[in-house]
């Protein structure tokens, strides 16, 4: 009897003790996740100015954007991109982009020795240019990640604020490999001394070539000139529109002489 | 035959465990009655320790009971005699550490014959009236037979079912909270840089050959045990006996004895060479009176220091243009540098050491000497001295200290080869002496008095030995931007030392009365610490090439803006205390303890122990005040006084223990208890306060043009004056208390059929004063993160000077961190153990135990300095908010089984095979983001586990990534689906330590082959060969015995916000204290963006775990290892 009573007590104690030890939850708050895709977006415009690169497809984060471009063409409009860090790439439509090293595609790479992507700011507009030739050698910077061949200029930030009444906005860039410094004169507007692939002048103060200048709307003969270069194009700048004018072509130095491999020309691209 | 029985009896006793009464002895108690059961007061009891002839005697009291407390562990013959009665004798009684053996004698009158066995000795120390708390004993024979590859007693603490996966962690608590005593002397590393002395050199304070008995107690309700909230690990060393006994031994292994295949993949381990040899000898100086025991052991582990050596077909160029060239750390360049440094033509010389063909050594010598003196039958004195001298060569640290870390680290890699003299040699030395006097004054009173002195001396030399030179550290980068080489001392080594001196004085007095055993006593420790840590006191120069360094020495640049011929960074932390070139933290502390206890046996079959202990921690040093930080206000209005150590309030520990012999025949026992346990916090945290008060050091951090122009290379370290404009402070809150827990256990022990003893035990521990760390200079969050919901901290250190809605991260701009120790009452651990043990006939014993543990805490205290604990702690909301989550020390399920068998045959041969199996849940870990999501300045953020593509914004990892965001989501989604933890917790934040690695199976074997000759009188000379096989399963099949670790616990990388904060530079010359010259103009907004990288070879991450494929000793856990030994045993 005593034995059974004692055993009973033991069992009861065990049950009480082990059920009293309950589990406790950890103390983290409830997350508040987003419910849909992002509302933020940026915008990009591409211009193919590499004289011997094949037709290129543009991709952001490996998703195609806009239309494929041949040399001398550009998007007809800005296309949207995600915001924040994203990979900007241009791939040959077929095969690889040849050249001395045989790079597979053109990539935006942050810094000469980094593989970092580009960062798009919310609501901003960008233009990216494909420049240089297949034969551009790989840079000698130690640990350079740029494999040579055609490369991006930019993406650069576009200020698309509305021009004053009766005006358009224009900027001028020298995108012809091997070209000397050139200047654009269009009526009273002169945009001077653009070196090849420069987005700003060296020297103090520095002139920003990417910024737009106002120009009264109307018909113009665009005159681009530099040492050994003189080309013109007739163009009508419409009121309220925004344009990029650029020099295209290709020249190669051989000893003291310059050989023009592709003729220089003035091209105009409209952004809006 | 007798030997087999003796061994098995001892071993069974050992495994069955015992309670913890004293930490160095055992005890005997019982009753003497006549045949009718009437008590016999005044009967004489003599217990003789057989091997030493030590005699303990007493007589029964008026209630017929007797006690012989504080007897040496070992084998006894107990004789009882009483005038007019036949004497009786019980032989071969084996006592383990902390065991109380009860024996009841029924005497028959003289000249009568007794027809039945009259002595009822309690055979089983498990089913024992004195046992209350959870404990495990490991006896000498187990140390001799069970496998331990590094000859480390910690390997055998794993026999306790509640041991965790990291050494000396029990029941889910940190191993810094244990108390280790050797012969009663405090032997854990109380400062806390590691759990045991010799921890930094990977050596042990004591050889396993010197150990007689070890006990691990988790819940001793006996108030004589204190100073831990984890476990008390008590070791007692061997003593000499009446016979000379000794042994000479040696153990060896190298890389050929290590498995090369891990899950079918051949991965060669690094070369190494390990040897351990020693001698022990014990015997009488005067028979039955005075005994000695000595043990000396030497251990050495040698590995080549350079695992990525220079390519000898060198490249001549000084600037190497092809980054794929494996020769850019060409010997020509390093040789050129070395020759330059040794050339006296430049006015000074410096020997950097060599860059190839040198070894990193771990070396230790241990010595122990013990004398036991049986002064008379009442008094016994033991004096023990032990010494450890150990060092280890360690590569230079990768840390940047006060500035940026050298790119790619300093340690030898495919890019970097540091010179040999920039390695450092860490020394851990210990000298300890303790004396214990045990006195049994009469049948009623006994006393134990202990006094001890321990000196721990930890210091550093340069690699290979010798004082670090008075020369700066120089880091030189290679052509690819990673560190190429380093020479000069490791930046954290000059003056680095830690001296700890501990004096302890204990006294314990027991009074034996009818039905009561009353104990009163005191246990006191006095500490003196001297910690000197002068990081970067010789200065650290960084050059972008060897040529830049050489030119800077011979012709420093005169062009301030040029980086060539000039350093690109200069760091210096100099002493701000005039006259003291190496200021340190010198301070004293004490922990006093007083206790009283009554063990009441008035109830039938029930023993009740009631005790009370008071611990008083005292910090007895006046610290200097820092008037600058005293005036500041920190977050939420807090004030901090670095000059004031925590108040010393006494800590009370009441305890109750119960033992109930349910059926009255010792076949079913219920035992348990409840009580408060007080621990001591590792003193390194208090030392952080003494050393980080902003007054000791000033600093120079110069980079680029500033470094080049102002700090051309000077082979003599610079000094300067004035305290640093920015500094860190460490303190504890005023009401800070040492850790305390409330612990309860209840257990049932039952004698089962077939001689098996079964135990079911539950332990519950609740933190009363848990410790956590907060940064009182970290401002509160000012916003929440869109698309996640957790708080967001300011993006800049400095506040916007005009807009209060855009605060800075720091409350006070010139304080880098203000770390405070604080208490929390959150945290608990509980465990449930089931255990079966049996000793079979013919030399076989076996035991198996399973333990389930759950442990949650606010901070698992896995690092030694307050700063590392604070920065390494994964969170969701704020590092200052203590949150209850799973412990890093948690091993949820654990099975431990051990078995041993010995057979002697063919007259001269004996073989024994022992095995320990442990199977356990893998380590817990946390899934975090790489990068700082919430801007608290720390990379410590737990991930949110997304349920769908809409809940997470993903982007490519870098320019080489070929995936679209949809493809990245698909890879991430598939990874989550196959991961057990993540798949069950979608839609939640990952919990700290919520995930765990897979189950580990580990079998360790030891085979001993003895060849012996009997030399008369039961003595033998034995030659013993031993083979230890660790992780035996991996030997049989390379797919077994694998130890897996998370493939990538920083699963996702935080890339940035959709709208990052816009910042402006500070141009306000009126505000020169703004250390970070920028503040927010607009806050960060929008959702966070993440990337989920592929493996480095471009393949997607598809599996949560990878095999640990370590190349060196500390990471051989997926490989089998063999160790061979030879031993000669004399007697």
Image (tube, rainbow, N blue to C red):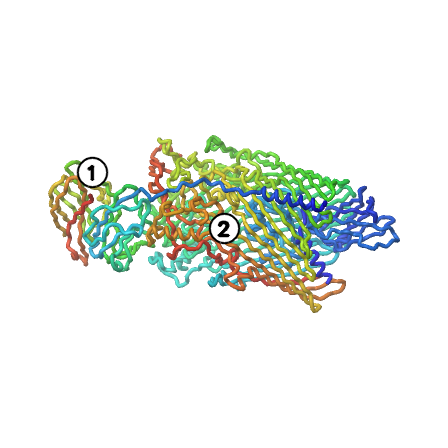
Residue at mark 2 shares a chain with residue at mark 1: no
Residue B996, label in figure? 2
> Which chain is disc 1 placed on?
A
User: As drawn, is A166 to the left or to the right of B984?
Assistant: left
Q: Residue at x 76, y 62 (%)?
A: B1017
**In the shown orientation, is residue B834 left or right of residue A271?**
right
> Is there a contact, CB below 8 Å, between mark 2 and mark 1?
no
- Please tell me in which quadrant of the rendered image residue A161 appears: top left
Pointer 1: residues within 10 angstroms few (<14), some, or many (20+)?
few
Q: Residue at x 30, y 52 (%)?
A: A62
Furthest residue in direction front, as rendered: A1
**Image quadrant containing the N terminus of chain B:** bottom right
Residue toward you, B618 or B870: B870
Badge number at residue A162? 1
Furthest toward the right, the residue is B111
State the image coordinates of residue B147 (x, y, percent, origin top left): 60, 58
Label 1 sits on a secondary structure element that is loop
Number of residues whose C-alpha sits closer than 10 Å to that of mark 2, classed few (under 14), some (14–19) or many (20 or more): many
Task: Check residue B812 in the rendering and tell me which mark sits there, or answer none.
Answer: none
Picture quadrant of residue B1002? bottom right
Residue B235 visible in the snapshot = yes
Residue B1010 on image: x %, y %: 66, 65
Chain letter of the residue carrying label 2: B
The residue lying toward the viewer, choosing from B377 and B825, is B825
Can you say which quadrant of the picture contains the C terminus of chain B?
bottom right
Q: Position of residue B966 (x, y in %)?
A: 34, 51
> Nearer the observer, disc 2 or disc 1?
2
Q: How many marks?
A: 2
User: Residue B430's spot in the image, x, y percent?
Assistant: 60, 49
């Amino acid at each position: 009897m005593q034995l059974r009573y004692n055993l009973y007590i033991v069992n009861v104690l065990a049950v009480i003790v082990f059920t009293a030890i309950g589990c406790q939850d950890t103390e983290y708050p409830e997350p508040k996740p987003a419910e849909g895709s992002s509302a933020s977006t940026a915008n990009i415009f591409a211009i193919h100015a590499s004289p011997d690169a094949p037709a290129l497809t543009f991709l952001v984060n490996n998703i195609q954007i806009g239309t494929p471009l041949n040399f001398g063409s550009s998007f007809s409009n800005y296309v949207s991109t995600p915001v924040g860090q994203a990979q900007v790439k241009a791939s040959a439509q077929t095969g690889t982009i040849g050249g001395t090293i045989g790079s597979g595609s053109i990539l935006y790479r942050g810094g000469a020795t980094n593989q970092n992507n580009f960062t798009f700011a919310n609501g901003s507009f960008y233009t990216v240019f494909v420049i240089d030739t297949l034969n551009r050698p790989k840079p000698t910077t130690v640990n350079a990640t740029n494999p040579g061949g055609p490369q991006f200029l930019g993406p650069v930030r576009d200020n698309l604020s509305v021009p004053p009444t009766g005006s358009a906005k224009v900027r001028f860039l020298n995108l012809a490999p091997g070209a000397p410094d050139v200047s654009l004169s269009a009526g009273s507007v002169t945009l001077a001394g653009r070196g090849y692939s420069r987005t700003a002048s060296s020297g103090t103060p520095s002139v920003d070539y990417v910024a737009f200048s106002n120009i009264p709307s109307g018909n113009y003969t665009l005159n681009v000139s530099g040492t050994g270069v003189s080309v013109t194009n007739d163009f009508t700048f419409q009121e309220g529109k925004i344009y990029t004018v650029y020099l295209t072509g290709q020249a190669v130095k051989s000893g003291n002489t310059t050989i023009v491999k592709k003729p220089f020309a003035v091209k105009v691209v409209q952004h809006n | 035959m007798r030997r087999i029985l003796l061994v098995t009896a001892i071993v069974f006793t050992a495994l069955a465990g015992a309670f913890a009464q004293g930490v160095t002895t055992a005890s005997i108690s019982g009753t003497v009655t006549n045949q009718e059961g009437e008590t016999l007061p005044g009967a004489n009891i003599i217990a003789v320790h057989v091997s030493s002839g030590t005699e303990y005697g007493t007589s029964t009291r008026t209630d017929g009971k007797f006690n012989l407390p504080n007897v040496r562990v070992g084998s006894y013959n107990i004789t009882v005699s009483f005038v007019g009665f036949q004497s009786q004798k019980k032989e071969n009684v084996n006592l383990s550490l902390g065991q109380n053996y009860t024996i009841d004698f029924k005497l028959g009158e003289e000249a009568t014959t007794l027809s039945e066995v009259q002595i009822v000795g309690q055979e089983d120390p498990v089913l024992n009236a004195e046992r209350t708390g959870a404990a495990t004993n490991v006896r000498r024979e187990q140390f001799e037979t069970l496998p331990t590859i590094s000859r480390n007693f910690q390997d055998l603490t794993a026999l306790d079912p509640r041991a965790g996966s990291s050494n000396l962690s029990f029941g889910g608590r940190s191993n810094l909270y244990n108390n280790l005593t050797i012969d009663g002397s405090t032997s854990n590393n109380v400062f806390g840089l590691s759990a045991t002395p010799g921890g930094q050199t990977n050596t042990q304070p004591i050889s396993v050959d010197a150990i007689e008995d070890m006990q691990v107690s988790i819940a001793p309700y006996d108030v004589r045990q204190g100073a831990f909230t984890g476990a008390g690990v008590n070791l007692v060393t061997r003593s000499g006996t009446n016979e000379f006994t000794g042994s000479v031994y040696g153990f060896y292994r190298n890389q050929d004895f290590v498995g090369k295949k891990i899950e079918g993949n051949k991965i060669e381990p690094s070369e190494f060479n390990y040897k351990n040899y020693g001698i022990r000898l014990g015997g009488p100086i005067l028979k039955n009176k005075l005994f000695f025991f000595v043990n000396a052991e030497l251990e050495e582990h040698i590995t080549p220091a350079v695992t990525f050596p220079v390519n000898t077909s060198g490249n001549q160029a000084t600037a190497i243009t092809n980054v794929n060239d494996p020769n850019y750390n060409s010997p020509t360049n390093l040789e050129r540098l070395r020759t330059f440094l040794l050339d006296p033509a430049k006015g000074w010389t410096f020997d950097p050491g060599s860059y190839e063909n040198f070894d990193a050594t771990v070396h230790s010598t241990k010595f122990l000497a013990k004398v036991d003196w049986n002064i008379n039958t009442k008094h016994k004195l033991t004096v023990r001295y032990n010494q450890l001298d150990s060092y280890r060569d360690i590569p230079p640290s990768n840390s940047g200290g006060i500035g940026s870390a050298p790119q790619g680290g300093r340690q030898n890699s495919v890019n970097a080869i540091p010179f040999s003299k920039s390695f450092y040699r860490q020394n851990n030395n210990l000298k300890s002496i303790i004396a214990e006097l045990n006195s049994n004054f009469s049948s009623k009173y006994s006393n134990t008095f202990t006094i001890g002195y321990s000196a721990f001396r930890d210091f550093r030399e340069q690699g290979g030995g010798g004082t670090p030179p008075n020369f700066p550290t120089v880091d030189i980068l290679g052509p690819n931007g990673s560190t190429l080489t380093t020479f000069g001392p490791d930046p954290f080594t000059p003056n680095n030392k830690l001296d700890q001196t501990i004096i302890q004085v204990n006294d314990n007095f027991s009074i034996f009365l009818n039905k009561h055993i009353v104990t009163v006593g005191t246990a006191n420790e006095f500490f003196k610490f001297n910690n000197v840590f002068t990081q970067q006191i010789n200065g650290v120069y960084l050059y972008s090439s060897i040529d830049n360094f050489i030119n800077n020495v011979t012709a420093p640049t005169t062009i301030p803006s040029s980086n060539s011929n000039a350093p690109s960074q200069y760091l210096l932390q100099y002493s701000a205390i005039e006259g003291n070139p190496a200021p340190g933290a010198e301070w004293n502390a004490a922990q006093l303890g007083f206790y009283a206890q009554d063990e009441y046996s008035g109830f039938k079959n029930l023993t009740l122990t009631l005790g009370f202990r008071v611990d008083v921690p005292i910090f007895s040093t006046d610290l200097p005040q820092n008037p600058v930080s005293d005036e500041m206000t920190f977050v939420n209005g807090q004030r901090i006084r670095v000059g004031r150590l925590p108040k010393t309030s006494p800590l009370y520990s009441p305890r109750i223990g119960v033992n109930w012999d349910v059926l009255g025949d010792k076949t079913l026992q219920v035992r348990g208890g409840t009580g408060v346990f007080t621990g001591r916090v590792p003193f390194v945290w208090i030392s952080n306060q003494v050393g980080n008060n902003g007054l000791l050091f000033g600093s120079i951090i110069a980079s680029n043009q500033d470094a080049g122009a102002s700090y051309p290379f000077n082979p003599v370290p610079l000094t300067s004056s004035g305290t640093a404009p920015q500094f860190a402070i460490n303190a504890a809150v005023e009401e800070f208390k040492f850790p305390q827990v409330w612990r309860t256990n209840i257990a049932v022990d039952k004698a089962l059929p077939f001689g098996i003893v079964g135990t079911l035990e539950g332990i519950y521990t609740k933190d009363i004063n848990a410790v956590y760390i907060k940064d009182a200079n970290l401002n509160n969050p000012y916003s929440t993160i869109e698309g996640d919901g957790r708080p967001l901290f300011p993006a800049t250190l400095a506040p916007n000077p005009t807009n209060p809605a855009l605060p800075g991260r720091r409350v006070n701009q010139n304080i880098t961190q203000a770390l405070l120790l604080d208490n929390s009452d959150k945290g608990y651990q509980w465990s449930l153990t089931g255990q079966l043990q049996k000793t079979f006939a013919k030399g076989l014993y076996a035991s198996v135990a399973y333990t389930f543990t759950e442990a949650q805490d606010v901070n698992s205290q896995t690092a030694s300095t307050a700063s590392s604990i604070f920065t390494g702690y994964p969170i969701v909301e704020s590092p200052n908010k203590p949150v209850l989550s799973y412990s890093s020390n948690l091993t949820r399920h654990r099975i431990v089984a051990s078995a041993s068998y010995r057979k002697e045959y063919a007259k001269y041969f004996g073989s024994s095979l022992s095995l320990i199996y442990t199977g356990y849940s893998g380590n817990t870990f946390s899934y975090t983001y790489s990068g700082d999501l919430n801007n608290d300045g720390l990379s410590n953020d737990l991930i949110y586990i997304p349920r769908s593509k809409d809940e997470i914004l993903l982007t490519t990892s870098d320019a080489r990534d070929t995936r679209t965001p949809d493809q990245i989501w698909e890879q991430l989604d598939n990874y989550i689906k196959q991961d057990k933890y993540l798949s069950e917790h979608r839609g939640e934040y990952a919990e700290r330590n919520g995930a765990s690695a897979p189950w580990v199976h580990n079998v360790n074997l030891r085979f001993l082959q003895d060849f012996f000759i009997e030399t008369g009188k039961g003595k033998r000379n034995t030659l013993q060969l031993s083979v230890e096989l660790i992780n035996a399963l991996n030997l049989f099949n390379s797919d077994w015995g694998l130890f897996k670790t998370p493939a990538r616990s920083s699963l996702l990388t935080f890339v940035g916000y959709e709208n990052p904060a816009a910042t402006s530079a500070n141009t306000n010359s009126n505000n020169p204290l703004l250390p970070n010259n920028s503040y927010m103009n607009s806050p960060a907004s929008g959702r966070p963006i993440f990337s989920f990288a592929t493996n480095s070879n471009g393949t997607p991450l598809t599996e949560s775990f990878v095999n640990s494929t370590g190349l060196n000793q500390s990471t051989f856990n997926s490989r089998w290892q063999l160790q061979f030994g030879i031993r000669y045993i004399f007697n």
